[in-house]
Amino acid sequence: MFDVGFSELIVIALVALIVIGPERLPRVARTLGALLGRAQRYVNDVKADIQREVDLDELKNIRSTFQDAAKSVEQSVNQAGEELQAAGESLNQSISATGEAKAGTEAETRTAAAPADVAVETPSASAQMDLGLESKPAADSAAVPRA
């Protein structure tokens, strides 16, 4: 702020000594030092408050950026989930339609090929075994041989 050198300080001290006098100079210097200290602390507090406000604004901006990014990610995840749900439903519908059509043609073939006095058989557990569709109990698959 002020460019005060050592020679200017000596001149100011000599003038103060002459004007104030040697008896009151220590008390005036002490008071002046206390006032300057208070002013310096006040300036530092104001600077710190301004810096805190600037940092707070930056943090708010960062927070809003992250919230916007989180909302965007959440929307994309929800959209992907909806697309997967729709794809799963369409697959389930096509599988069930294919299964119904296949079951209908097999039933028609069996009834047409079977003589009138022979009953039509439905697939049994033995047919499921041949196809490898039999479900095994959990105890058999989890059994561990003991030594």
Image (cartoon, helix red, strand yellow):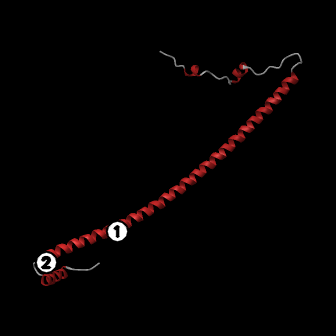
Instruction: Give the image location of residue 27, x and y in percent.
Output: 15, 74
Label 2, label 1: how far apart the Cα atoms are: 32 Å
Residue drawn at the location 66% of the way across and 43% of the way down = 85
Q: Which mark is residue 25?
A: 2
Q: Which one is nearer the viewer's eye here, 53 or 136? A: 53
Query: What is the residue that sits farthest to the right in this orientation?
Result: 116
Describe residue 116's horizontal placement relative to residue 15 as left or right: right
Q: Earlier in the sequence, mark 2 or mark 1?
A: 2
Instruction: Give the image location of residue 88, x and y in percent.
Output: 68, 40
33 w.r.t. 144: above or below = below
Q: Which mark is residue 47?
A: 1
| Secondary structure at numbered mark 2 | helix
Amino acid residing under circle 2:
Leu
| Secondary structure at numbered mark 1 | helix
Disc 2 vs disc 1: which is toward the camera? 2
Amino acid residing under circle 1:
Lys
Instruction: Give the image location of residue 22, x and y in percent.
Output: 10, 79
Instruction: Give the image location of residue 81, x and y in percent.
Output: 63, 45
Residue drawn at the location 38% of the way across and 65% of the way down = 51
